[in-house]
Image: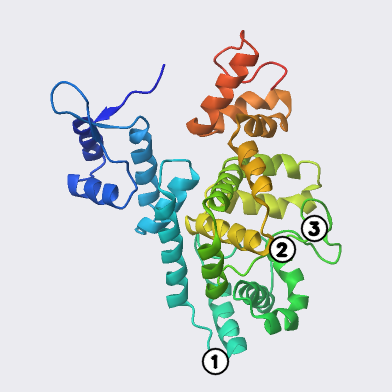
């Protein structure tokens, strides 16, 4: 059954149940966070919102409880495949970049600036702080934060000077244990820290954003959606083959940060991908093929097939409706006798 449109009175009633005023709805429409209604073509004057608007409002309210930044909310709703105009996303990413520029001014003594900020980051607590999943000396944690800041700011001299501190970042993230290396020496974790991008190098970010085509932005969106949906479910499976000593720190990190990351992480992920794409400049045919693959339900089916057959129903139940429903529809098409409870007995 096709989803139905939603009239404006019903949407206002839903919003009111959550303490949202008509004025807020109008603000969110004007900022492109909700679609505009259209008058029904016949009959009395009724304004109808597109199918899916109720779910979009639900997700908007979810993210509104985490931040007051409408730019960050626009980015994450766009990643979740709600109809947010791509020009609104360009503006939102530019706003996030300008915010970084206002908060970070490393002009002058860059080493001193990095050291100062590293001490603040190392001491910070709470959801937006760096993880505390392994025991580290305070000085080592500061050095790890300093290396991350040097990379994020694209301070080449500082990156080179602090190169030995990359192993401390791996320890902080649960990838390294003692002198043995742990997961840092195993696929797919090799070079995870070395592949970091200068996401707080404002000039480079602005350059990448200015040159990004709509197709490049769409590929970053699709990749971010795939990662945000599947990584929380896949990471435990990926870690299952490793010993508890190797995997427990990263497993703890996933429990703390991957399942429900801070909303800023989504914007940083898009910026990271745009920087990588700006460096590589993929051909138009390559972009088109990658977009087509990620837009297809086949990609989600392939992700589901990674799990053991006896776990797939449980995994399906944990997926957001926007991902789960196309998978179930495709499985039913392939397996007409499929029950409503989930994947086919033999999987996709």
Task: Return the disc, 3 or 1, that comes first in the chain's sequence.
Answer: 1
Left or right, 150 with respect to 79, comes to right
User: What whole-number distance in Å separates the C-alpha atoms at marks 3 and 1?
Assistant: 35 Å
Q: Nearer the viewer, residue 330 or 22?
A: 330
For label 3, count other residues whose C-alpha is less than 10 Å away and answer few (under 14), some (14-19) or many (20+): few
Specify the quadrant that holds the C terminus.
Answer: top right
Q: Which residue is mark 3?
A: 190
Left or right, 92 with respect to 296, comes to left
**Which one is closest to the eye, mark 2 or mark 3?**
2
Looking at the picture, does residue 282 appear above or below residue 57? Answer: below
Q: Which residue is mark 2?
A: 195
Q: Position of residue 344 (x, y in %)?
A: 66, 17
Q: Residue at x 42, y 70 (%)?
A: 99
**Mark seen at residue 295:** none
Q: Residue at x 67, y 64 (%)?
A: 279
List the single residue furthest toward the bottom.
108
For label 2, count other residues whose C-alpha is less than 10 Å away and answer few (under 14), some (14-19) or many (20+): few
Secondary structure under tag 3 reads loop
Q: Position of residue 56 (x, y in %)?
A: 37, 39
**Which one is closest to the eye, mark 3 or mark 1?**
1
**Mark seen at residue 108:** 1
Q: How many marks?
A: 3
Q: Residue at x 39, y 58 (%)?
A: 71
Residues at circles 2 and 1 in contact by the CB criterion of under 8 Å: no
List the single residue furthest toward the right.
180
Residues at circles 3 and 1 in contact by the CB criterion of under 8 Å: no
Looking at the picture, does residue 164 appear above or below residue 255? Answer: below
List the single residue furthest toward the front.
284
């Amino acid at each position: 059954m096709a989803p139905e449109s939603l009239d404006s009175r019903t949407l206002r009633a839903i919003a009111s149940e959550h303490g949202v005023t008509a004025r807020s709805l109008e603000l969110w429409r004007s900022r492109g966070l909700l679609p505009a209604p259209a008058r029904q073509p016949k009959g009395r004057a009724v304004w109808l919102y597109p199918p899916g608007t109720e779910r979009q409002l639900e997700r908007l309210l979810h993210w509104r409880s985490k931040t007051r930044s409408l730019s960050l909310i626009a980015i994450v709703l766009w990643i979740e495949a709600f109809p947010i105009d791509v020009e609104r996303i360009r503006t939102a990413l530019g706003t996030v970049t300008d915010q970084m520029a206002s908060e970070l001014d490393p002009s002058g003594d860059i080493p001193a600036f990095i050291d100062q900020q590293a001490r603040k980051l190392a001491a910070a607590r709470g959801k937006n702080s760096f993880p505390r999943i392994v025991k580290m000396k305070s000085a080592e944690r500061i050095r790890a934060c300093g290396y991350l800041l040097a990379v994020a700011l694209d301070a080449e001299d500082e990156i080179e000077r602090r190169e030995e501190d990359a192993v401390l970042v791996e320890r902080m993230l649960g990838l390294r244990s003692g002198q043995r290396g742990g997961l840092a020496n195993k696929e797919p974790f090799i070079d995870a820290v070395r592949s970091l991008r200068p996401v707080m190098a404002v000039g480079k970010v602005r350059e990448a954003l200015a040159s990004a085509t709509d197709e490049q932005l769409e590929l970053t969106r699709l990749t971010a959606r795939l990662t945000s949906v599947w990584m929380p479910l896949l990471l435990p499976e990926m870690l299952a083959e490793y010993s508890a000593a190797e995997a427990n720190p990263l497993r703890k990190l996933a429990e703390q940060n991957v399942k429900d990351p801070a909303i800023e992480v989504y914007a940083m992920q898009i910026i990271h991908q745009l920087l990588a794409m700006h460096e590589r400049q993929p051909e138009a045919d390559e972009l088109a093929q990658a977009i087509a693959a990620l837009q297809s339900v086949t990609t989600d089916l392939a992700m589901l097939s990674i799990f053991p057959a006896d776990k797939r129903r449980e995994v399906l139940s944990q997926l957001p409706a926007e991902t789960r429903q196309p998978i179930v529809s495709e499985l039913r098409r392939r397996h007409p006798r499929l029950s409503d409870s989930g994947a086919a007995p033999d999987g996709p």
